[in-house]
Amino acid sequence: MTNHDVYIKALEKAAKNGWNGSDYHANFSAYIFSHDFAKAFWGEGTIHYGGKPENAVFHTCAWQYHLGKMVLEENPLQYLAKFL
């Protein structure tokens, strides 16, 4: 899947989950790094990490966890592709 394909599919997934992006052709980082997009794409469920859920060191919203991981990626669109 090309980066363009990932971008379009990610925007479509977020839109299905209630995100209201207005221009799919804008600078991709204006969308994929926004909190509103991340909330719609990954949801606000809880992520447990740093161990098994019962022993987890950290608990956070899924969108915050994944957005933090994505900003560290060399190719953030390929990170998004894992969740399509």
Image (cartoon, helix red, strand yellow):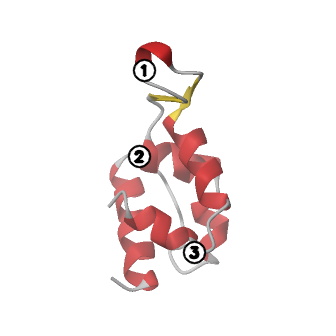
Q: Earlier in the sequence, mark 3 or mark 1?
A: 1
State the image coordinates of residue 74 (x, y, percent, origin top left).
Answer: 63, 73
Identify whether 24 is placed above or below 72.
Answer: below
Circle 3 residues within 10 Å: few <14, some 14–19, many ≥20: few
Q: Nearer the viewer, residue 25 or 82?
A: 82
The amino acid on which the numbered mark 1 sits, given as a three-letter code, is: Pro
Q: Residue at x 36, y 57 (%)?
A: 83
Label 1: how many residues lie within 10 Å, few (<14), some (14-19) or many (20+)? few
Name the residue carrying label 3.
75
Q: List x then y, in percent, for residue 34.
A: 64, 54
Q: Position of residue 23 (x, y in %)?
A: 54, 73
Q: Is residue 42 left or right of residue 28?
A: left
Q: Residue at x 59, y 21 (%)?
A: 57
Q: 67 or 20, which lies in front?
A: 67
Between disc 2 and disc 1, whose residue precedes?
2
Residue 33 percent coordinates (x, y): 64, 59
In the image, residue 27 sits, relative to residue 76, either above or below, namely below
**Label at residue 53:** 1
For the residues marked 3 and 2, what is the alpha-carbon distance in whole angstroms? 25 Å
The residue drawn where x is 44% and y is 39% is 43
* Local SS, label 3: loop
For discs 3 and 2, the disc positioned in front in the rendered view: 3
Residue 83 versus residue 64 in the image, above or below: below
Pointer 2: what residue? 18
Foreground: 75 or 19?
75
Q: Label 2: few (<14), some or many (≥20) within 10 Å?
A: some
Gap in angstroms between the C-alphas marked 2 and 1: 28 Å
